[in-house]
Amino acid sequence: MEVPRPSAPGWCAQSIPLALGGVLKLQLCELWLLLLGSGLNANFLPHEEDVDFINEYVTLHNELRGNVYPRGSNLRFMTWDVALSRTARAWGKKCVFKPNSHLEEIHMAHPTFNGIGENMWVGLENEFTATTAIRSWYAEKKYYNFEDGSCSKNCSYYKQLVWDNSYKVGCAVTPCARIGNIIHAAIFICNYAPGGALSRRPYEPGVFCTRCGNRDRCTDYLCSNADRDQAIYYHYWYPRWEVPRPIVCDPLCIFVLLLRLLFFIMCVIIVLIVQPYFPNILLEQQMVFTPELSKIEEKKREKMKKIEEENEGEEEEEKEEEE
């Protein structure tokens, strides 16, 4: 998708004489166009928690999963997960087109799920739409042979997209100055839970919803479950490896801050209570310690005088001997 260039104002469209004032106007016109164009592109990519963005990719996932061929009998209905979208955003910040190395690590990619799935798309920033990226993954279906489960080319993105056990998805798109040979790129990542091992056929063929769980119901040809599909917002969880990491104060952090504030207030109160009972404590310390210090100094001075007198006596004796 190309961003439409802003139309120039009337005073820019007119022919400008190449005098000093005309050149200045031309430069101002170009600067105005540049700033306006950059302002339009600044917010081009959606935030990972933008509602319209979430609805777009979640709805498309369920649409494609519900209309697979051959028909699926046990595919689950997918709902959004904020932790998965934060993981997608954190890895996207690295601007590298390679799999996330933290997906198999415990609690590194999600606070409750382990073994997270991942799909990635890279392209020009001004050409990105979630629909374009997700349909490109689904297009790998032409390389997949459902009968024997083989792939003539890479079809891992397709298999993850229609993996039957997955029911949570979170995506994020990140702008990058450069990824490989692509300048002004965008990297779009979707994470899935539970992720697929991709070592078998992605789903069981058959009449839709015939192999759902006992407590499941059929929604858009997919197995849905109210308890399984409820949204959980992980307020304080972010990937530990995210750089820069968002500053978040969890309940333990808040407790420590309140505890420190309480101790500080207690210290101030204790000082205010005790201080009236010892109004001259600093003066008393000076009176006690000052005489002792003066005696020590007097002794030092006497020793120095004796040493000087002895030195003078030795010098006089040496002079007399020389004479």
Image (cartoon, rainbow, N blue to C red):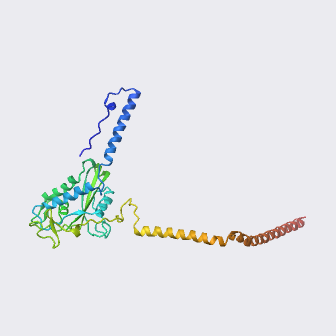
Whether residue 28 is visible, yes or no, is yes
Left or right? Give the position of 78 relative to 73: right
Image quadrant of residue 101?
A: bottom left
Q: Residue at x 73, y 72 (%)?
A: 289
How far from the left and from the top, in percent, is residue 127? 24, 48
Nearest the viewer among 273 and 64 is 273
Q: Which image quarter holds the C terminus?
A: bottom right
Q: Residue at x 30, y 54 (%)?
A: 47
Nearest the viewer among 139 and 167 is 167
How far from the left and from the top, in percent, is residue 308? 82, 67
Q: Is residue 13 above or below residue 145?
A: above
Q: Residue at x 89, y 67 (%)?
A: 321
Nearest the viewer among 20 and 218 is 218
Q: Is residue 17 above or below residue 112?
A: above
Image quadrant of residue 212?
A: bottom left
Q: Residue at x 57, y 70 (%)?
A: 269
Q: Is residue 126 above or below residue 260?
A: above
Image quadrant of residue 120?
A: bottom left
Number of numbered discs on residues: 0
Nearest the viewer among 322 and 147 is 147
Whether residue 202 is visible, yes or no, is no
How far from the left and from the top, in percent, is residue 29? 35, 34
How far from the left and from the top, in percent, is residue 83? 30, 64
